[in-house]
Amino acid sequence: MVFILTQKKEITVGTATDALRPDKAMAAVEKMVGKKGHIWTIPDIVDNRLYAPFDDPAWTNWFTGMAEEDHGTDNKGNKVYMVAIGEKSMALNNSERIKRAYDKNEFLNYGFAKLDPEEFARLLKYAVPLEEIKEGNLTLPESYIIVEKVDKMVFNKRGYVPIGKKAKQDRWKDTLRTDDRFLMIVGSEERRTKLLDKIESKWDTYGNFHRISDVDYSVPQGRLVQANVNNFGFNGCNGIYLNARLVGGSAGGAVAQKITHKEFLENRVANAYNKRNDILTNDGRYIFISNERLEK
């Protein structure tokens, strides 16, 4: 199985999963891709799924994107919701920053971590208003931030949202086509339309799991975003304090750090590799190499 990163025209070289510590998964991917590498964002994952069949691991596996959703108040006291895409824009943008949340016990409810006032102010400073995205006047860079005042947002209750035929039968409007949170996560109207057109052919509902109505906006906070299995949709899930699966690629398909031969010696590991499943390495981390067999 080969993951093709359609947006960036490069081959993805592997994923790292840690069942308990997202900072360790991120550290593994950072080391794997090197300084010139790229860790997938949620829009990258969506772009891949647009071209992958529903039985492909792109759909049947869940992935954590280099994307975060942030809550807080602006300098006028307005509650704001932001989505930051890519490591250059995010506050929780590297393994050391996430490790700090563990070391200093900065966890909040629903998988969020406290953000420094300076971090949140920077996010606000460089954020693009959602209205500009809706108007289609911007070509977003690889890394960006979108912001909207909560009292101006259109969003459904968290959970599975009826779509397509199911929406019509239940006399629902297909709210994911107008849901602001869903748009901000996927990054563009075009990507949202293509994704919903595709999933409508298979599922009657799609997940849009958020905490917009639940968090304490007086405390700046953020969490990583996951693209879940099949129609589970997008979720903060366990945020930054439990499990992550990050996908890394580097220019030209080169791997900054190849997995060693020793990690493939046991039959159970070799069988998992042959079946295209994640591989449990010696340090308890799961690594999946997707574009080539390693020489033994």
Image: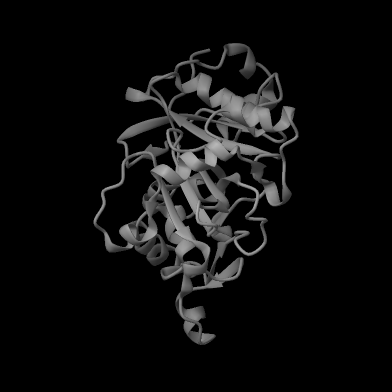
Q: Answer left or right for 183 relative to 227.
A: left
Q: Residue at x 58, y 40 (%)?
A: 117
Q: Nearer the viewer, residue 22 or 263?
A: 22
Please provide percent x and percent y for residue 224: 58, 43
Please provide percent x and percent y for residue 201: 43, 68
Q: Is residue 1 above or below residue 37?
A: below
Q: Nearer the viewer, residue 293 or 136?
A: 136
Farthest left residue? 137
Q: Is residue 10 above or below residue 296?
A: below
Please provide percent x and percent y for residue 48: 40, 46
Residue 288 image-quadrant placement: top right
Q: Residue at x 47, y 42 (%)?
A: 123
Q: Answer left or right for 261 relative to 253.
A: right
The image quadrant where one finds the N terminus is top left
Q: Is residue 16 above or below residue 214?
A: above
Residue 4 appears in the rendering = yes
- Tag count: 0
Q: Residue at x 62, y 38 (%)?
A: 244
Q: How is the image coloured?
A: one colour
Residue 18 image-quadrant placement: top right
Residue 279 appears in the rendering = no
Please provide percent x and percent y for residue 71: 57, 52
